Amino acid sequence: MMWCHVYRSTKKENCYLYTEMEGDFSSIPTTILSIFGTPVYVMKVLLDGKRRLAVGTSAELEEKIRKDGFFLQMLHEDDFKV
């Protein structure tokens, strides 16, 4: 179980970034940030398995955030091409 911070993209509709530390984007590759745009804070979420998520489970998101430092949610992957 962990708290995470959710940001929406200013460039891609339905694209969200989840991080463990609020305002810390140091683990996110610059390529992703350049495509994502300026992150806009949306909310703080507790990944405890009780909340229904659009993609994956709380455990999967937590694992990805702990491993990579972030989770990028793209509801339409084809829209996220350079």
Image (cartoon, grey):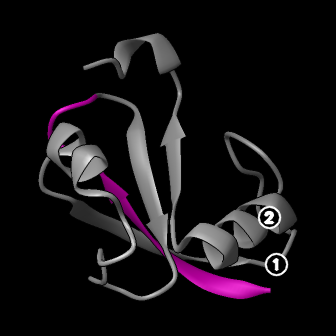
Q: Nearer the viewer, residue 33 or 53?
A: 33
User: Which element carries disc 2, helix, strand or loop?
Assistant: helix
Q: Residue at x 42, y 56 (%)?
A: 17
Q: Position of residue 43 (x, y in %)?
A: 41, 71
Kindly identify the amino acid type of the residue bearing the numbered disc 1. Asp
Q: Residue at x 70, y 40 (%)?
A: 55
State which quadrant residue 31 falls in: top left
Segment tinted magenta in the rendering: 1-12
Local packing at callout 1 (Cα closer than 10 Å; few below 14, some 14-19, many 20+) is: few
Q: Residue at x 67, y 40 (%)?
A: 54
What residue does disc 2 label? 58
User: Which element carries disc 1, helix, strand or loop?
Assistant: loop
Vertical relation: 29 (above or below) 1: above
Residue 78 horizontal side relative to residue 36, left or right: right
Q: Residue at x 21, y 37 (%)?
A: 35
Vertical relation: 22 (above or below) 43: below
Sequence-first disc among 1 and 2: 1
- Is 11 one of the magenta-colored residues? yes
> Is residue 9 shown to the viewer in this render?
no
**Proximity of marks 1 and 2: CB atoms separated by less than 8 Å:** yes
Vertical relation: 38 (above or below) 78: below
Kindly identify the amino acid type of the residue bearing the numbered disc 2. Ser
Q: Position of residue 27 (x, y in %)?
A: 39, 73
What residue does disc 1 label? 48
Cα gap from disc 1 to disc 2, whole angstroms: 6 Å
Quadrant occupied by the N terminus: bottom right
